[in-house]
Amino acid sequence: MAAAIRLSRRNLGRTATNPSVGTIIVRDDGSGPMIVGTGVTAVGGRPHAETEALAEAGPLARGATAYVTLEPCAHHGRTPPCANALVSAGIQRVVGAASDPDPRVSGKGYAILRAAGVEVVERVLAKGAAEQMAGYLIRSLRKRPEVILKLALSADGMIGRKGAGQVSITGDAARREVHLIRAEADAVLIGIGTALEDDPALTVRLPGLEGRSPARIVLDRHIRLPETAKLVSEADRIPLYIAACADADQQRRAALERRGVRFIGTETVDGRIALPEMMEDLAALGMASVLVEGGAEVARAFLEEGLVDRIILFTGPEAIGEGGIMSPIDADSVPPGFRKLRETRFGEDRAVEWIRDLV
Ligand code: AOF
Ligand code: ZN
């Protein structure tokens, strides 16, 4: 199952609104277990992982065990339910990890299997699978995308320097890791302050992962993003959404729309964008995970609203000192309810990740 969970990561960020599921089919003819088929939910969400793995296994699926990171589906989509496909292929035993909250599936997938005489084992490494498909689960259960908050901190806890534009805090290996995290998200979100200060592109620029850039979202109540911004220059290729108020300048809006920029209407509360409502709108657009990349004010707002599900803090070796912008959070102030998931080194930098368990 651990291998199936790792496999499921392959298409994270490319299967919305479906989760990226992994399936491994194993048979044992007496000389030890042998993998005869593997599958991941395809880009775009179909075919499902089981279909792919069964196709690879062919007749070798008969009598084999299928490891699935999510309960096999029980509904008719473009193809018959995966639960039925597993039965027809002669799978003898199904080992499942996460349960599926989708009402069309929940409990029914396993029931189809059991009714056909297939042995079913549930909730094996369920927590690990849920971590991997947190976006799908949170969108299904809470009607909003998963929020991953990522910040890069200097040795003295700063995230940048006022008026200095993009300050590099971490090195190249950490930068590549951030691009990988972007590739696995459905959208990257920043505030207009960061957009104006840094002029970032927020794309994935990793060899082999070009074309995996998620949508970009800018919180920009009064539409201050200039048409010359890097974000706008690629809006025809990679979706760019601006969350703006209804009373923002309509001419600026029209000009940006002509460049391919899309708008999300938002309400404000005390002069700030109403985040919970906006998150519902993003879920309705099909987004299951949003990576919040800056700046301090935006990060603080998401934390205060209790909207953060995962926190990733990168720390570089150097101090920023005078004129630094204090991070709204550090390793010692992670809110209660979060559990430390992992700690990784990237050259001289360190990344620590915390997650809030769903159940
Ligand atoms: C599986 N295997 O690999 C995935 C599943 O829109 P559809 O018809 O593709 O169905 C989407 C639902 O299928 C989704 O809500 C979830 O319940 C399930 N996803 N199921 O058996 C898979 N990705
Ligand atoms: Zn299915």
Image (cartoon, rainbow, N blue to C red):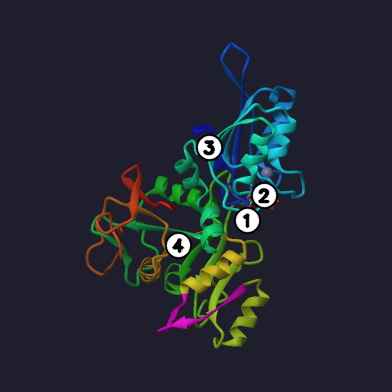
Question: What is the magenta range?
Answer: 262-274
Q: CA distance from mark 1 to mark 4?
A: 19 Å
Which mark is on residue 272? none
Q: Residue at x 62, y 87 (%)?
A: 251
Residue 105 % position (x, y): 64, 49
Q: Residue at x 73, y 36 (%)?
A: 85
Say if disc 1 is inside 8 Å of ligand 1: yes
Q: Earlier in the sequence, mark 3 or mark 4?
A: 3
Q: Earlier in the sequence, mark 2 or mark 1?
A: 1
Which mark is on residue 17? 1
Q: CA distance from mark 1 to mark 3?
A: 24 Å
Three-letter code for the amino acid on which mark 4 is drawn: Val
Residue 159 % position (x, y): 32, 62
Say if disc 2 is inside 8 Å of ligand 1: yes
Q: CA distance from mark 3 to mark 4?
A: 34 Å
Q: Earlier in the sequence, mark 2 or mark 3?
A: 2
Q: CA distance from mark 2 to mark 3?
A: 23 Å
Which mark is on residue 45? 2
Which residue in the protein does label 4 denote? 292
Q: Earlier in the sequence, mark 1 or mark 4?
A: 1
Three-letter code for the amino acid on which mark 2 is drawn: Gly
